[in-house]
Amino acid sequence: MDRTSFPKICDLWDLRNLLFCIVILCLFRADVGLGQNSCDLCNCTLDNLNQSHVDCSNRSLSNSMMPTVYPNVTVSLNLSNNPIGSLSECFFSKLHSLQILDISSASLLQVAGCAFDGLHKLEVLNISHNLLVISNKTVNLRIVRDLMSLKVLKMNHNVKDTKRTDISYPDEALGQVKSLQTLFLDGLVNSTFGPGFRNLVNLNTVIFSGEKKVGYCGIEAISSEMFKNVPYLKSLIIRECRVEHIEEQAFSPLSQLHLLDLSGNKKLGIDGAALGFQGLKNTSIRVLKLNNIYPDFSIGVRIKRKYVEMLRNLSITEMEFSGNKIEIVDGESFDDMPVNLTKLNISMNRFLMGDYLLHASSLKSLTTCDASYQFFSPVNTANFKKRDISSLQDTTKLTMLKWTNLTIQIPENLKAANFSHSKLAFPVLSFRIGKNSLEYLDASYSILYNWTGPVVGFDSLTYLDLSNNHCSELSFQFFDYLPRLVTLLVSNNLLGIAISRDVDGRIFQNLNTLQYLDLSNNRIISLNENIFRGLVSIQILNISHNLLDTFLVNIGHMKNLRVLDLSQNMLQVVRYPVRIALENIASVTTEKVYVNISYNQLRCMCSTSYFMAWIRDTKTNVVGMTSCILTNGTKAAFNYRNDIIRYINYMDKECMSKLGLILGTTISISLAIVIVIVGIVYRYRWKLRYLYYMTMNRTKGYQPIGNFDTDNDFVYDAFVSFADEDREFVRDFMLKKLEHERGMRLCVSFRDFVPGREIASNIIEAIHNSRKTVMVLTESFLLSKWCVYEFQMAYQESIHSGRDAFIVILYEDIPTERIYRVMDMRVVFQSNSYIEYPHVSRLDGNEQALDMFWDRCTQAIKESGYCNK
Ligand SMILES: *[C@@H]1O[C@H](CO)[C@@H](O)[C@H](O)[C@H]1NC(C)=O
Ligand SMILES: *[C@@H]1O[C@H](CO)[C@@H](O)[C@H](O)[C@H]1NC(C)=O
Ligand SMILES: *[C@@H]1O[C@H](CO)[C@@H](O)[C@H](O)[C@H]1NC(C)=O
Ligand SMILES: *[C@@H]1O[C@H](CO)[C@@H](O)[C@H](O)[C@H]1NC(C)=O
Ligand SMILES: *[C@@H]1O[C@H](CO)[C@@H](O)[C@H](O)[C@H]1NC(C)=O
Ligand SMILES: *[C@@H]1O[C@H](CO)[C@@H](O)[C@H](O)[C@H]1NC(C)=O
Ligand SMILES: *[C@@H]1O[C@H](CO)[C@@H](O)[C@H](O)[C@H]1NC(C)=O
Ligand SMILES: *[C@@H]1O[C@H](CO)[C@@H](O)[C@H](O)[C@H]1NC(C)=O
Ligand SMILES: *[C@@H]1O[C@H](CO)[C@@H](O)[C@H](O)[C@H]1NC(C)=O
Ligand SMILES: *[C@@H]1O[C@H](CO)[C@@H](O)[C@H](O)[C@H]1NC(C)=O
Ligand SMILES: *[C@@H]1O[C@H](CO)[C@@H](O)[C@H](O)[C@H]1NC(C)=O
């Protein structure tokens, strides 16, 4: 109730009434007067013209809770989905700017006469999905009084009982709404548009729909009277209205009719619809929709020529015959199709293969054909009435399946064809397409399992979808004759083996214009390096959902590559050549280059550190580095790119320190080995030298290897080792005493060494060729390098040959510690007897003692060198 109406009630100068009035007023103000502000209750939004849109939908608003205060310029108000019940007051009278009012689904039972008062600017009124009885009585002149701008009126889904005969379309009232253009109505049985509609010169669209949740419709028969009063209709939609019968001239008053949709009238059939075709002759019909006009489980339909003939002279450009169980079309029917037909939808039928399809080429104007979802039900002659079977056999000789050098004619202006979801189930062998301009062909989901080809003649084709065909057979030449192809979708097949056989890149070699290739879900295990060599224009390459564990394919020539999808494979890394190629591609474009590597088995390890560094530093946009497997086998997940970068940096350090560790360890191990070797060499330096010279001498053949079985094999009895300082003693005494007087053969360096030969070599040979080595041990001996050398060599000889080869003459008194300081000397000195030289001074010139000394010497030299002491 409007507050301004209070003075009217309270204009009695009666005190009692005044009192009553005040009480009422107070109550009222407390209740409503404070203003149920729409913007408190609802969602108010301002558009950029400062106009308010108030959305009160679905807020459980009842009649008494209706908002009364609205923003000044409210242009739309949505009250749908509220249990309002009735519009018993003049709620909207102040909304002078309102253009759209939605009171659908508001359980409206009745609408007061003043309900829409003041809505002078209202253009769209939606009172659908209520419980209103739409009739002369309820929709009356009072109600529509102010709706002089109304263009769209939705009254559908109100009259549930469409069979009521006491109601009709409210022509008297609606006839006053001259601006009305579009009307949504529930279809009443056998009803006609009354004379009031004649005024509606703008009414161009009437929509009846019995579709669930849209409206109620039970028009059983369309009489020739029905549309007499609405001659301005351009679009007439009578969907799911249980129409069974159309009178021949029913549509003839509709001279401006452009679109007629009779879909979903399942009892109509082509026979029923054809009756109405007569009346279409006078119209300017362009679009005819006859989808689903057969019962759900009806038998197969044959389109007879006589029906098609009725359409021949119509100006139809677009036709829909979807979902009609059509199995066959009389061969010549195609010749009688409307000449200007450009769009044809015959999806969801059951077309059989047959010669009649070859006539399809006579649809000269056809540009778009949707023949998807064929053969939904198995082909079964039981689907036919008996009399149709013979004609069926006449017309379908099934020669389509004989592929020998077949040339298939298709409508020459056909640009787009969709055969998807059809159980075609035949191998695509070699055939030729006649003159055509086909650009778009969708043959996905059609069980085309064998692509042997080649298919010649698709010279204009830019889009080819062969995905989901269970195809495992792909010949190298199948794609050879598609010179304009831009998009090729072959996902969800089984091409993996066929493709991996293609070592030289034959399959795709001629697809030079291809920009988008989808190879996903093909069980590809491996790809040869040159497989994509022909794809010079490629922009999007999708190889996801396969089984690749390596991707080592040349992509360097793909200068326009923008998306490389490698997701859902089993890759561990992106390999170096591919990384390089991607960087090169990314560096010559300003556009983004995306590489998707999500859902692989990427590794984050030190061994893959280059790959990880690439992910961090690359110029491309790597997508989907969401997880990777760590060295210890656990999987790390990343939510943000920053996480990845942080992890990679961390790994870098980790790996560097590991590298350091490895390097350090290696170095120290080698060092240790070197030290050990050096130590060993040092420790065995004498032995090594000895062996070396022995070997040298042997190989040089200076001396045949002595056979030490007998002592006689020695060249000398003794080799005398002495320091230079003691040379006189040796020359003047030792030689005289041992050689001249006692007949020993001695070897002394100054006399017996072979001149010109290495000293070391001479020494070895001397030791080797002498039964004993006599050392004249003096301080000088211990200091002399060569003497120590001679000692060591002799020592080695004694070890090597097992001889006891030493005779030590202690020529001077030397502290034993000094002696022991020479390596191995202790052993020798302790285990060998030594002979002390009796110095004359000490012996008081006792010549006898000297002789005894030399005798002992001689004896020691003569003793067998082999130890068996
Ligand atoms: C209000 O409406 C606007 C636009 O329709 C919408 O974006 C917003 O979420 C709504 N707010 C509420 C609280 O419903
Ligand atoms: C909308 O209102 C604001 C302030 O109320 C004003 O600044 C703006 O110019 C208005 N915009 C239009 C399109 O009227
Ligand atoms: C009103 O709101 C409902 C949702 O409750 C929505 O479906 C409907 O389209 C809205 N009406 C208008 C005219 O925006
Ligand atoms: C209305 O709101 C309820 C809960 O607030 C919600 O469950 C329902 O889907 C809404 N309905 C529509 C049509 O928006
Ligand atoms: C609405 O209009 C009234 C009168 O024209 C004015 O007093 C009021 O301030 C306006 N309200 C808004 C929110 O603009
Ligand atoms: C509705 O009113 C019109 C015009 O007054 C009249 O011709 C028609 O018969 C009425 N319909 C019904 C069902 O009363
Ligand atoms: C509707 O018209 C058809 C054909 O004219 C007729 O058979 C049928 O009985 C009528 N239905 C009603 C409810 O009048
Ligand atoms: C077909 O289209 C042409 C050119 O638009 C037109 O002249 C001709 O009348 C049309 N034919 C029919 C039957 O509408
Ligand atoms: C197919 O046709 C071509 C030319 O149209 C012809 O050269 C070839 O022999 C034919 N092949 C067969 C098997 O008929
Ligand atoms: C595909 O067709 C060719 C040619 O008829 C045939 O040789 C091949 O065996 C077929 N492959 C499969 C898998 O049916
Ligand atoms: C594996 O290593 C990561 C980090 O290097 C660590 O967070 C994780 O706990 C480790 N998992 C196991 C099972 O050791």
Image: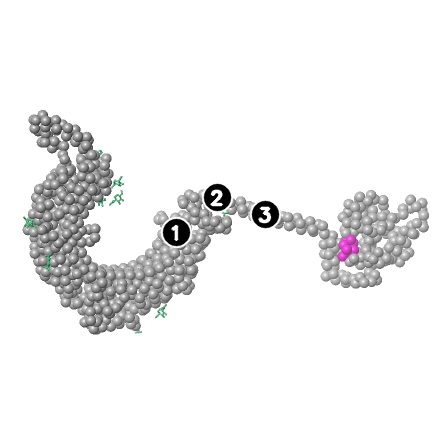
* Kind of residue at badge 2: Tyr
Residue drawn where x is 18% and y is 66% of the image: 303
- Decide: few, some or many residues near mark 1? Use Cα within 10 Å; few <14, some 14-19, many ≥20: many
Please provide percent x and percent y for residue 320: 20, 59
> Which badge, 3 or 2, comes first in the chain's sequence?
2
Marks 1 & 3, CB-CB < 8 Å contact: no
**Which residue is denoted by mark 1 in the rendering?**
596
Is residue 666 positioned above or below 24 on the image?
Answer: below
What range of the chain is rendered magenta? 793-800
Residue drawn where x is 20% and y is 34% of the image: 36
CA gap, disc 1 to disc 3? 39 Å
Magenta stretch holds residue 799:
yes
Residue drawn where x is 43% and y is 49% of the image: 627
- Toward the front, the furthest residue is 16
In the picture, residue 51 is in which quadrant? top left
- Decide: few, some or many residues near mark 2? Use Cα within 10 Å; few <14, some 14-19, many ≥20: few
**Which residue is denoted by mark 3 in the rendering?**
665
Can residue 138 be seen in the rendering of this structure?
A: yes
SS for callout 2? helix
Please provide percent x and percent y for residue 816: 82, 44
SS for callout 1? strand
| SS assignment for the magenta stretch, majority | helix
Residue drawn where x is 23% and y is 38% of the image: 42
CA gap, disc 1 to disc 2? 23 Å
In the foreground, 447 or 496 = 447
Magenta stretch holds residue 240:
no
Question: Does 552 sit left or right of 167 as displayed?
Answer: right
> Which badge, 1 or 3, comes first in the chain's sequence?
1
The image shows a total of numbered marks equal to 3
**Which residue is denoted by mark 2 in the rendering?**
650
